[in-house]
Amino acid sequence: MTIKVLEPTELNILQCAQALQSGSLVAFPTETVFGLGAAVTQPSAVEGIFRAKGRPSNHPLIAHAHTGFDWAEGWIDLSSARLKAQFLALTQQFWPGPLTLIVPKGDKMPLNVTGGQRSVGVRCPQHPVAQALLKATGVPVAAPSANRFGKVSPTRAAHVVSELGVSVPYVLEGDIPEVGIESTIVSLLDETPRLLRPGRITAQQIEAVLGQAVAVGPAAGENAVRFSGGLEKHYSPDAKVCILSAEQLMAEPLPSSTLFVGWSDSFIEQANQKGGQLQNSSVVSNSGLPAEIEQNLYIWLRQADEQQWDCVVFEQPPALPEWAGVADRLRRAAW
Ligand code: TXA
Ligand code: MG
């Protein structure tokens, strides 16, 4: 099989929706990263996701649907008044958008989507192509990021082709993902909401909407969950990834072929000096706006391998809430 790259015309979106309904896999753009979709009602397609990614089958998937989809019709269980109030407040504020909520699953949600767990991650993406595809499909679409397990998530259709081009029949193109890193994941399973994966929407924004504190990191015990974004090593290119401050840069021994990515004047200056001492180097400098860095982060990580750098050095992100997504992905990429 070779993958068909389709422009997101109305006709192609309809064709992809029909492919999903009849049990094919379809990769599609979202505002975060490209997803590898299967209709949750098609068990062999859902299995196909795990095969195509090389992902352990007990790792749960996120179910996606369009704005206006009625999740409460048996897909999720909102019978707890506490949970329902939190769910409605957050979805009203942040959907469609880069927020995934972990809630108890309903009877209709198959266990192969949830990795056997009684909870499910649900998300309503904002990207117009995702919205149109999900609306035309009519049932939730399970979609992890469309990359091989542990590798860098794709933010362009061409990345999907290079990662999964032999095991997936279709990829829809679309405008460049505005967010660029995966959705923020918040679990509502316990009274205190938990941030399981940081992203564009910050813990502070969640707290402001709910009027209560948010715990950070996975729960221990019964509501502990398996999730691959939580593995220490993830989002990894083959090149070595380092995270260094401008001050650390000069003293650090680096491979002879190194790419530097930074934003502060002092880091860029040090990187230029250090690079001058290496056989081969390049310095990418950018605005230092966290949103812009999120949008390009996976492009740089991918470039590290495409351009065969031995090492890519990122400037150490500041310890501020709006940098939590970048810091998290870099830490796992550097593991
Ligand atoms: O932005 C995104 O969320 C992208 C796009 C395609 O929507 N999707 C994505 O999916 O990042 P994936 O599978 O690469 O990451 C989903 C994360 C995983 O770490 C998964 O284990 C976790 O969500 N997850 C899913 N269901 C869960 C559950 N019931 N409990 C805890 N974690 C869950
Ligand atoms: Mg992923």
Image (cartoon, rainbow, N blue to C red):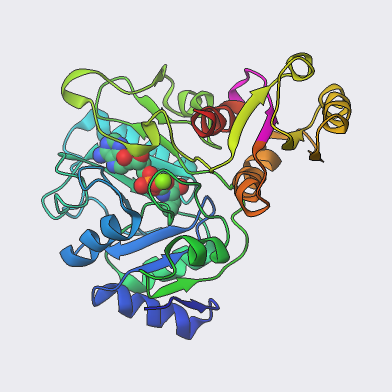
* Residue 10: image location, x then y, percent: 49, 82
Observer-nearest of 121 and 249? 249
* Residue 287: image location, x then y, percent: 80, 37
Please provide the residue range marked out in magenta: 312-322
User: Is residue 282 toward the left or the right of residue 119 in the image?
Assistant: right
User: Is residue 64 toward the left or the right of residue 42 in the image?
Assistant: right
- Residue 101 shows in this picture: no
* Residue 47: image location, x then y, percent: 21, 59
Determine the residue located farthest toward the bottom in the rendered image: 11
Determine whether 242 is above or below 40 in the image. Answer: above
* Residue 96: image location, x then y, percent: 47, 51
Question: Residue drawn at (50%, 57%), measured in percent from left and top?
Answer: 30
Observer-nearest of 241 and 211? 241
Determine whether 32 is above or below 243 in the image. Answer: below
Find out whether residue 251 is within the magenta segment: no
Question: Residue drawn at (81%, 24%), measured in percent from left and top?
Answer: 267
Total numbered labels placed on residues in the image: 0
Q: Quadrant of the N terminus?
A: bottom left
The quarter holding residue 230 reads top left
Determine the residue located farthest toward the left in the rendered image: 107
Determine whether 217 is above or below 133 in the image. Answer: above
Question: Residue drawn at (60%, 33%), measured in percent from left and top?
Answer: 241
- Residue 219 shows in this picture: yes
Question: Residue drawn at (62%, 40%), measured in percent from left and top?
Answer: 294
